[in-house]
Amino acid sequence: MPGGGGGEIVPTPELICLTGFLGAGKTTLLNKLLEHALTRFRVAVVENDFGDEGLDAALVGPSGAPVRELTAGCVCCTLKLELKAAVREMIETHKPALVLVEPSGISRTSDMLPSLAALEKEGLVRVGPAVALVDARNFSDYLESFGDFFTDQISAARVLLLSHLDGLGRESVAGLVSELRSLNPGASILADPWPPLDSGALYDFITAPAGRANAGDVGHDDASFTSSFSEDDADGRHHSHRHDRGHDDDHERGHDDDHERHHECRHDGDHDDDHERDHHHAPAGPDVFSSWSGIIRGSFNRRELTEALAVLGSGRAGRVLRAKGLAAMDDGGGFWRFDFLPGHSDVVPAPGAADGRISAIGQNLDDGLLAGLFKADGGE
């Protein structure tokens, strides 16, 4: 754990990676941890968004922590060099005691950890626990659809936090915990809703040495509950992202500059850190994630945004796995923040937002329909 309060800076900062599939709640967790960490020491944040329009940095920025944003790719493959450079930059510039890294929701943790280990070998950081948020509501669907790719984040983590537990009974949660145990027997698992917890207690649980986390650490009052702890851009671009096992760690990226474009990150074998990065272009298939992002030019009331999000759930725009954005209110009173996940959507005021933008990730996305729905990139 980083050094004590009063802004004390330790020589070697700790790095904690916050992972989780699309919409699991990584940014919410990040902001909650910042509530506590910023009162004790300097913190720097590295954010990765697979789309061209990064939104998470705007949602973290108000915390006061410096944020370095990496967009249009994934830190587990196409942005590995950039991840290392970003961590170095944040440490040299801000001298933090703690670096929080939030990868894209479609990052493979096992492909990213060697990059972090290389930074540790250089003496630049101490790699702390990898935390994986697990969407309890969509776990079965994602497991069936994405298999080993989805479970990689779970099996590579030291700490597992369940999210979206609303509406799930204790028996369902207990069954999920059992499945998680089979995927990662050594992880510390928090199956209680964590957003209401004290931010300091949650931070202490995450950073506790393996085998030291326990129910009392997080104010857990009901010993019969199913918690289980371990013992031990703005132009409508498309990006496609394919993960196969094996990869090269640091290899050169290539891009074309078309208005719409597909990027495929294919990992074909084990390579060393200095190997060239090949950039393959291929049509979208069932194992490819596409992203679309744009600037929202129009304004909305809450009902209009809710109806647009309902279209995403209908499948007319392709299989949308995650969408999020900021849109101006039609009465000029500020901005809305909107979020979409399969089976759930939300529209709430967004104090402090300054511009409208949207990012969506899924499969076989219809960028024209998305642009029209959200009055984005000339699509209004």
Image (spheres, rainbow, N blue to C red):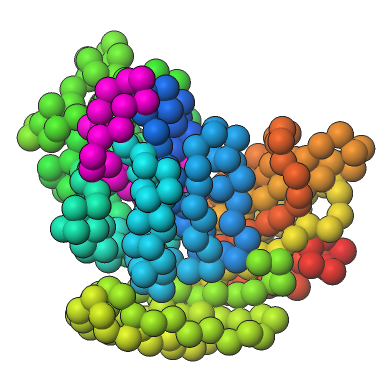
Tell me: 371 left or right of 18: right
Residue sticking out furthest to the top: 221
- In the rendered view, tell whether residue 216 sits above or below residue 226: above
What secondary structure predominates along the stretch shown in magenta? loop
Q: Quadrant of the C terminus?
A: bottom right
| Residue 280 placement (x, y as % from top left) | 44, 88
Q: Quadrant of residue 178?
A: top left
Q: Quadrant of the N terminus?
A: top left
Asked if residue 171 can be seen in this view, the reply is: no
* Residues shaded magenta: 1-27
Q: Quadrant of residue 222?
A: top left
Residue sticking out furthest to the left: 232
**Residue depicted at x 43% and y 86%:** 279
Tell me: 270 left or right of 194: left
**Residue depicted at x 59% and y 56%:** 54
- In the rendered view, tell whether residue 85 sits above or below residue 55: below
* Camera-nearest residue between 109 and 193: 109
- In the rendered view, tell whether residue 96 sits above or below residue 219: below
**Residue depicted at x 43% and y 28%:** 38
| Residue 173 placement (x, y as % from top left) | 32, 34
